[in-house]
Image (cartoon, grey):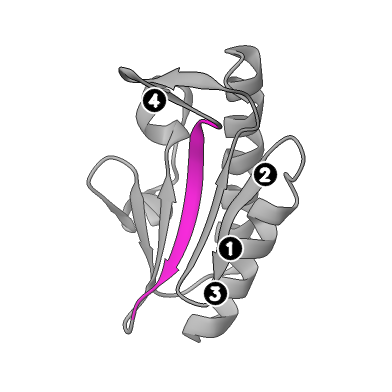
Amino acid sequence: MESEISAIRTTLTDLLKEQVPPLKIRKEAENVFEVAGTKEVMQGKQKVDGHYFASVVPKPQDVRLYFFPIYTHADQFNLSDELKKFLKGKSCFHVKNLSPELEAELKQHIEKGVELYQKDDLI
């Protein structure tokens, strides 16, 4: 079980990088990593150059994974009880430790999010 913030950040970032393309990296810095779609779409009432997908933000006590597909397609995701413990609000996971099982589950959810967004022509 990994509990070091930098290692968790790297793992989560790598999971998202595996989906580039069809996603594109919008921000990549030590304090934030963000991916989005590549198509110009309407996001709310605003036209954007790529629909927001997810970001990784390290904090002193945990790593935040903001995962937008779980907000836009909430009924499509079935989280394990362990992963539910990390969910704060509707789309933000506060990851304090990362087991191989949780990493595999997050990978599946990210892949599913990409599939759902592709199906809806968002990315």
Identify the mark nearer the N-term, 2 or 1. 1
SS for callout 4: helix
Residue kind at label 3, given as amino acid type:
Ile
Location of residue 28 with respect to 49 vertically, above or below: below
Residue at the spot of label 1: 12
Residue at the spot of label 4: 72
Query: How far apart are the alpha carbons under marks 2 and 1?
Result: 15 Å
Quadrant where the N terminus is found in the figure: bottom right
Q: How crowded is mark 2: few (under 14 residues within 10 Å), some or many (20 or more)?
A: many
Identify the mark nearer the N-term, 3 or 2. 3
Residue kind at label 4, given as amino acid type:
Thr
Residue kind at label 2, given as amino acid type:
Lys
Q: Which residue reaches farthest left?
A: 89
Residue at the spot of label 2: 24
SS for callout 3: helix
Location of residue 99 with respect to 66 vertically, above or below: below
